[in-house]
């Protein structure tokens, strides 16, 4: 009987804290750290970190770049902060449906092409380590995963580091990468490609 109930539960859409999550949902997180506060002030946003849902069964798994590019259970991802996470989803239902129909390939693409790559604390686009592995920061990873999978562009811009300039200069050891291509979680928050489904 217990096995039957478990099997039926696995067939249902995953709901977390009353919110149904789907593969491809973008999760924005208000992490609290020194560089996090700099990011939030620079971008005029409550969010300094992000990931993307790559699996919902049997539990929700988030792809993220933090320490390294990896998969993190939603429970562990959420426990990093006491503040709410924001769930963003594509407005274009065709994109949502395409990801759902190809959810296993989406996860496979992440595992084959991104998982295990090093984190990039320098926030540089197309930045590589001494082994030739691409280094990725959180919003860059989400951009590249979604862009390569869907074939459409994600939010990107020329970066500025003019708010709290002295602290950015300290962070980058004297040379902030002004004008370089990049993005931040706030660019997904403000993008017209997405809408907010709710909070976790």
Image: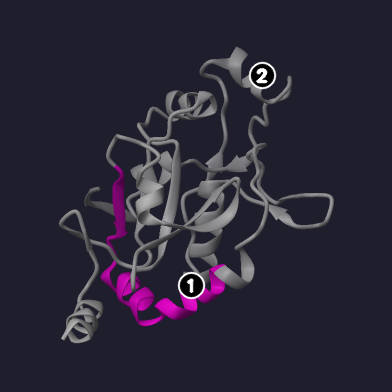
User: Against 51, is 169 above or below?
Assistant: above
- The picture places residue 161, in percent across and down from the top left corner, at 57, 25
Looking at the rendering, in which quadrant would you find the N terminus? bottom left
Q: In the picture, residue 43 is in which quadrant?
A: top left
Identify which residue, 178 or 145, lies in the foreground: 145
Identify the magenta region. 85-110
Give the numbered dot on residue 169: 2
Say whether disc 1 or disc 2 marks the residue closer to the N-terminus.
1
Mark 1 or 2, which is nearer the eye?
1
Q: In the picture provided, is 33 more to the left or to the right than 78? A: right
Q: Is residue 101 left or right of residue 34?
A: left
Residue sitting nearer the eye, 142 or 11: 11
Percent x, y of residue 136: 63, 50
> In this view of the protein, can residue 143 be seen by the observer?
no
Q: Position of residue 124 (x, y in %)?
A: 66, 42
Residue 4 drawn at (x, y percent):
19, 86
Question: What residue is pinned by disc 1?
Answer: 107
Residue depicted at 35% across the width and 82% down the height = 101
């Amino acid at each position: 009987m217990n096995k039957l109930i478990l099997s039926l539960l696995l067939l249902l859409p995953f709901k977390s804290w009353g919110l149904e999550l789907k593969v491809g949902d973008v999760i924005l997180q208000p992490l609290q750290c020194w560089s996090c506060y700099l990011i939030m002030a620079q971008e005029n946003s409550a969010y300094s970190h992000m990931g993307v849902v790559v699996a919902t069964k049997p539990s929700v798994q988030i792809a993220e770049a933090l320490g390294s590019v990896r998969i993190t259970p939603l429970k562990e991802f959420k426990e990093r902060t006491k503040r709410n996470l924001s769930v963003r989803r594509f407005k274009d239902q065709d994109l949502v449906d395409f990801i759902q129909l190809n959810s296993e390939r989406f996860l496979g693409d992440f595992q084959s092409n991104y998982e295990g790559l090093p984190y990039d604390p320098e926030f540089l686009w197309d930045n590589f380590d001494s082994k030739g592995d691409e280094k990725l920061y959180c919003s860059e990873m989400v951009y590249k995963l979604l862009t390569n999978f869907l074939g459409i562009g994600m939010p990107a811009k020329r970066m500025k580091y003019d708010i709290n300039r002295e602290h950015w200069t300290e962070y980058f050891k004297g040379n902030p990468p002004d004008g370089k291509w990049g993005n931040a979680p706030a660019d997904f928050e403000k993008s017209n490609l997405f809408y907010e489904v709710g909070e976790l």
